[in-house]
Image (cartoon, rainbow, N blue to C red):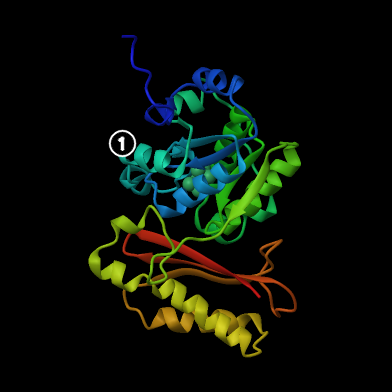
Amino acid sequence: MGEATPAPEALRPLVVRTRTELRTALATAPRPIGLVPTMGALHEGHASLIRRARAESATVVATIFVNPRQFNETADFEEYARDEAADLTTAREAGADIVFIPTVEEVYPAGSQTTVRVGALTEALEGAARPGHFEGVTTVVAILLCLAGAERAYFGQKDAQQLLVVRRMALDLGIATEIVACPIVREPDGLAMSSRNVRLTPEQRAAAPVLRASLLAARAAYEAGERDGEALRTAIRGVLAAEPLAAPEYVSCADPATLRELARVDGPALLSLAVRFGSIRLIDNDPLP
Ligand code: PAF
């Protein structure tokens, strides 16, 4: 009897750890390629990105890399959840063919001197609150986009500013990969899925849906005819103020293309916020209308 041929399912996903292994795997991979960049700690939000890529691509590549350059707080980087075995199970079940898990040295080769910086779009909101964050994001995403040469790359709408910044970068640098925005995935109580949610204490976790509740209060005011930007921000702040565990970092009602704060909402707007629960920082957003 000849050797048993493993079922293709048992071989998936192929784990590659170096640039060369990734390039070799992709050289013969059927196209189009869909890329899902992640920092691991995969949850249902990531799974939805991988499933979307699966539906639209012949080859799905997920990347898992906790990018030190985008953390402006050492503790946040060190405490960021890491569980490769669980991530590979999630990636396989969602449909990834290849998972790229590089080391820091593989992503940033010895002597690395290149950073990618996007301008004004990175200065508000997350950029203002987390100095250096977006430079780290755009640098690593540019590297991943160059390495994968994918037709499409998938990003969650939860990081709305990241999505705008990555789109801008791809346009400015002539990167041909289409940047695809995917909807926020929420827990049943409305909390947006995030790898940081697992670090909340039970009390903080119980309080965290206040982010969504505050955005819904502003949406309700908008739907009742409120068009004053500050009144909408005040509606968000009012709900947050009632939750003692929540320490708001910023509350925004901004132009969704420029991220400049709006005095009046006469067209589309992006409501967004960042709130701390102890040392854990959560973000959420809601595009109007
Ligand atoms: O959204 C994330 O998880 C990260 O910012 C990304 C896009 C994977 C870059 O490290």
Q: Is residue 172 left or right of residue 240?
A: right
Whole-percent x, y for residue 186 in the image? 44, 64
Q: Is residue 190 left or right of residue 178?
A: left
Q: Is residue 188 depicted above or below 170 in this figure?
A: below
Q: Amino acid at mark 1?
A: Ala
Q: Is residue 82 depicted above or below 204 in this figure?
A: above
Which quadrant: the N terminus?
top left
Whole-percent x, y for residue 276 in the image? 38, 65
Whether label 1 lies within 8 Å of ligand 1 gets the answer no
Residue at x-position 45% and y-position 49%: 47
Which quadrant: the C terminus?
bottom right
Residue at x-position 57% and y-position 38%: 35
Question: Can residue 132 be seen at all in this image of the molecule?
Answer: no
Residue farthest along the bottom direction in this orientation = 224
Dot 1: few (<14), some (14–19), or many (≥20) neighbours within 10 Å? few
- The image shows a total of numbered marks equal to 1
Residue at x-position 40% and y-position 75%: 210
Question: Can residue 287 be seen at all in this image of the molecule?
Answer: yes
Question: Which SS class for mark 1?
Answer: helix
Residue farthest along the front direction in this orientation = 1
**Mark 1 — residue?**
85
Residue at x-position 45% and y-position 78%: 213
Residue farthest along the left direction in this orientation = 202
Q: Is residue 226 depicted above or below 180 in this figure?
A: below
Whole-percent x, y for residue 148 in the image? 59, 30
Whole-percent x, y for residue 212 in the image? 46, 73
